[in-house]
Amino acid sequence: MGREPATVIITVRNESGSVDALLDSLFQGSRAPDELVIADGGSTDDTVERLRARARVEPRLRVLLTPGNRSVGRNAAIDAARHDVIACTDAGVQVEPTWLERILHPLEEDAAIDVVAGFYRPIAHTPFERAAGVVSAPALEEVNPERFLPSTRSIAFRRAAWEKAGGFDETLAHNEDTPFALALKAAGCRFAFASDAVVGWSPRGNLETFYRQHRRFGFGDGESRVQAWFYGTIAIKYGAAIALLLAGFLFRPAWWALALGVALFVIQQGRRGLGRIAPLEALLLVPFLKVVYDAAYLGGYVRGRMGPPASARRELP
């Protein structure tokens, strides 16, 4: 197969400070989009004005006004796209110059490939951000391509795959890319992993925003009823720790078992950061933020499960 024309889609909302840099990075890359469709979800700053000014001199750029969540915007952008190969990234990321070329390559080389999962790396400047990046995203060597679920920061797919998966679920306002990726797999789509198709993203810079972000992600998984096994393992892990803590008041060796478990947890999480960030940051901040991460995800998931499932909301008139 040869080069196929491709549309890049992005959703934005109040991205006045970053949208110009994102457009520059895409159009100045080793392969520029044949078309770029940006859906604005209701900006109250001058994002739309900036985009429209750019569109007047860049015919490949089209701007849509799509009030609503990111799923609404993405579906509208794909509906409006002129091409059947779609690449997706997010506002606020830094797209590497070769990103589009490399994420489209598997689709162009093999007609049987339906979806390409790209990669993403944290761009961090403070100790907290660096540790948050380790906790929030895998290192490349941690990725199992067979199980890796792509993020909408870095993904490409054929329109037919999007249609088979039923599009993005517009009832979901949080972590909607996970159910979409799972729907693609359930639809029998064939995936490829492009480890060199990389975008950079900025982790949250303080404890409050870090917790709130991952609680939203967990909430999205809860309302869409996905990845119950993941949350079950978190609950079992911390449930066992609490049980050992309480048992220690009656049977002191339980506390020794708890201390050993905590030590192994700290070593395991610290090792994830070694070689990626400073040793003290890896050994002190990463284990602490992992606990916060787990608590946020589990709390959000439980809250999401308490409401009606997304499938029920779709059936409402």
Image (cartoon, rainbow, N blue to C red):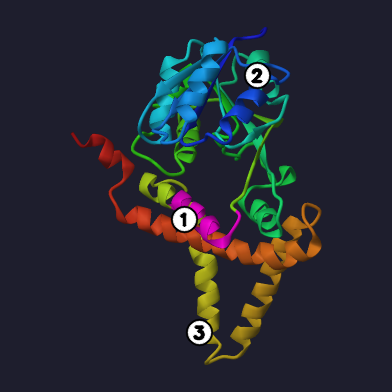
* Dot 3 alpha-carbon crowd within 10 angstroms: few under 14, some 14 to 19, many 20 or more: some
Residue 138: x %, y % from top left: 67, 47
Mark earlier in primary sequence (1, 3): 1
Residue linked to disc 1: 215
User: Looking at the image, can residue 288 be seen?
Assistant: yes
- Kindly indicate whether the residue at mark 1 contacts the one at mark 2 (C-beta within 8 angstroms): no
Structural distance between the alpha carbons of marks 3 and 2: 59 Å
Label 3's element? helix
Structural distance between the alpha carbons of marks 2 and 1: 35 Å
Q: Which mark is residue 27?
A: 2
Q: Nearer the viewer, residue 250 or 130?
A: 130
Residue linked to disc 3: 246
Instruction: Give, as a three-letter code, the residue at label 3.
Output: Leu
Mark earlier in primary sequence (3, 2): 2
Q: Is residue 163 left or right of residue 290?
A: left
Height in image: 163 above or below 298? above
